[in-house]
Image (spheres, helix red, strand yellow):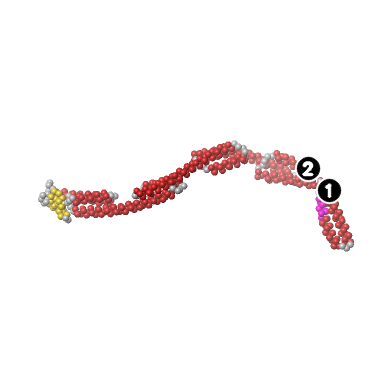
Amino acid sequence: MSSDPWGRVDETGTVYVRTADGEQVVGSWAAGSPEEALAYFERKYEGLVVEIGLLEKRVRTTDLSAKDAQTAIGHLREQVDAHHAVGDLAALRGRLDKLVETVEARREERKIQRAKQSDEARKAKEDLVAEAEQLAQSDQWRAAGERLRALVDTWKGLPRLDRKSDDELWHRFSHARSAFSKRRKAHFAQLDAQREDARRIKERLVAEAESLSGSTDWGPTAARYRDLMSEWKAAGRAQREHEDDLWNRFRGAQDVFFAARSSVFAERDAEQAENLKLKEELAEEAEKLLPIGELKAARAAFRSINERWEAIGHVPRDARPKVEGRMHTVERAIQEAEEAEWRRTNPEARARAEGLTGQLQAAVDKLGAQIDQARAQGNNSRADKLQKELEGRQALLDQALKGLQEFGG
């Protein structure tokens, strides 16, 4: 018979293992020595020790599920309870019991962790839904569309919740995206319609602009081009593929007209500058007639100057008042000289002036005689009163005599 601290082999070849409940039969050994029998079952024990150690390491270092861990523990426990190994089986049971506790603790930790992750995922999805519902009302079509696509990618990366909660949140999220897509589609459909209207309007404006490009009616045509430009701006933008082409045609038609007008105006400006020079020379010639001497000669000279003036074309608008003012000054001087000559040679006016002078002279003479008579009579008061009246008549007489002198009398 052979034995060690944990087992023995009796004379019949039966192998026993020692436990707290007494010896338990491990098996029988017919071939070889009892020592070999104990060594064989001790190796089986060592095998169990290795398996339990490996399972402990897997539980400690990997994400082995609690269910798989319990299944493995149960399998090893069956082997230990079967007593087919020689060694400290109680110690193995203790390690398995401790491992069960560890697995249960890990299961609880994972449960708590999953609950935490679920809460975080729920909060994250609720936040995504809230942002999506806000974006659904946005008119920033490009930015909002890109953000919604990013939210979908974020959603896909989050853990699923329970079916009911996940489905409800996804329904709201999907509805927000659909609402945004519907609004964006309606917006761009309306925009397309507006751009089509703008295209039709601008094609009409281009046609009119091109028809006006050869006009030489400079003022009205330039004004009409300004109106066309205002209508162009008010029409809005056409589709991109049409806008640039229409604008190039519209602008090209204007350029043709305004280039032609600029050429004509440049020639006109040069001509008007030369006209101004000629009229300034005539104005200088007219001014030499001042002051008016011989009226007849002055009138004939001015008539000659004015005929040459009228034969000259337009001058620049800003220079016109000054040069024409110089001519008007000479013309007014001649007119004033003519009026003075008329007054001097008018027989009726001369007769009226002579009659008035005679009347005033008679009145002055009469008052003088009355004053002398009053003083001779010693009536100085009457004489003084008559003297004041005489002074007034004398002033009128002096004025009348001066007027009469204008008639050469």
Mark 1: give few (<14), some (14-19) or many (20+) Cα within 10 Å.
few
- Mark in the foreground, 2 or 1: 1
The residue under label 2 is: 296
Residue at the spot x=69%, y=41% of the render?
278
Where disc 2 sits, the SS reads helix
Closer to us: 387 or 307: 387
Q: Measuring from the top left, give residue 284's x and y in whole percent.
A: 71, 44
Quadrant position of residue 379: bottom right
The residue under label 1 is: 351
Q: Amino acid at mark 2?
A: Lys
Residue 179 visible at all: yes
Q: Is residue 278 above or below residue 44?
A: above
Closer to us: 41 or 276: 41
Q: Measuring from the top left, give residue 269's x and y in whole percent.
A: 64, 40
Residue at the spot x=17%, y=54% of the render?
19
* Range of residues picked out in magenta: 395-403
Q: Are marks 2 and 1 in contact (CB under 8 Å)?
A: no
Mark 2: give few (<14), some (14-19) or many (20+) Cα within 10 Å.
few
Q: Is residue 262 above or below residue 373?
A: above
